[in-house]
Amino acid sequence: MYAARSGESECLKWLLDAGADTTLQNNSRVTALGLALQKQNNECVVILQHEQLNCTYHKEQWKGDTSCPSNFNVDPYQKDEKLLRLHAFTGHFVPMRRLVQSGVNINSQDSRGNTALHYAAASGKVDCIKELLSNGINLDMRN
């Protein structure tokens, strides 16, 4: 948790590769992802979100098995669409643009109906909004 809170992204990657449990909570019941969000350590947020996507996909495929090897392969389309929304929200323009250019469905919605545009707008990431608009994102998608 200290690595996520302090923004030590390389240390965080090493810990995750070694099998660190991302579901552990501190005394205030906050996970590493929560700490990274609180401290606005965006690189750590992206790393932890990616790890969480791996775990979520693994649990869905194996019906509740909570073990989560960090090297588990996620469906690349599902992962890329979720990462697109995450990068739009956190303002990571370059990786978001790469995903758009690679052909990821920019109109994909999460379980609440939110698209990358919804997330970029909610967090005020103007560059991401402009990129999504210039690539033809559907403005009529409702959440």
Image (cartoon, rainbow, N blue to C red):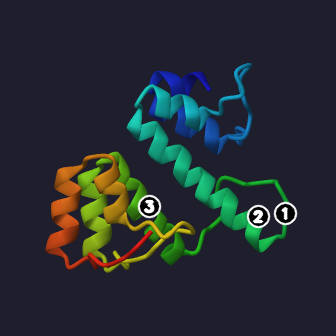
C-alpha separation, residue under disc 2 versus residue under disc 1: 5 Å
Does label 3 or label 2 sit earlier along the sequence?
A: 2
Query: Please, is residue 119 above or below residue 11 in the view?
Result: below
Residue 65 horizontal side relative to residue 58, left or right = right
Residue at 63% in and 44% down = 17
SS at circle 2? helix
Looking at the rendered structure, which numbered label has been put on residue 64?
1
Residue at 15% in and 62% down = 130
Task: Provide residue 78's location: percent of width, then percent of height.
Answer: 53, 73
Task: Provide residue 62's location: percent of width, then percent of height.
Answer: 82, 70
Query: Please, is residue 84 above or below residue 135 in the view?
Result: above
Q: Nearer the viewer, residue 114 or 52?
A: 114
Do the CB atoms of the residues marked 1 and 3 lie less than 8 Å apart?
A: no
Q: Nearer the viewer, residue 87 or 16?
A: 87
Residue 114 horizontal side relative to residue 52, left or right = left
Q: The disc labelled 2 sits on which kind of residue?
A: Lys
Do the CB atoms of the residues marked 2 and 1 lie less than 8 Å apart?
A: yes
Residue at 74% in and 19% down = 27
Looking at the rendered structure, which numbered label has been put on residue 116?
none
Looking at the rendered structure, which numbered label has been put on residue 59?
2
Quadrant holding the C terminus: bottom left
C-alpha separation, residue under disc 3 versus residue under disc 2: 18 Å
Residue wearing tag 3: 83
Query: Please, is residue 99 above or below residue 1 in the view?
Result: below
Q: The disc labelled 1 sits on which kind of residue?
A: Gly
Residue at 59% in and 51% down = 51
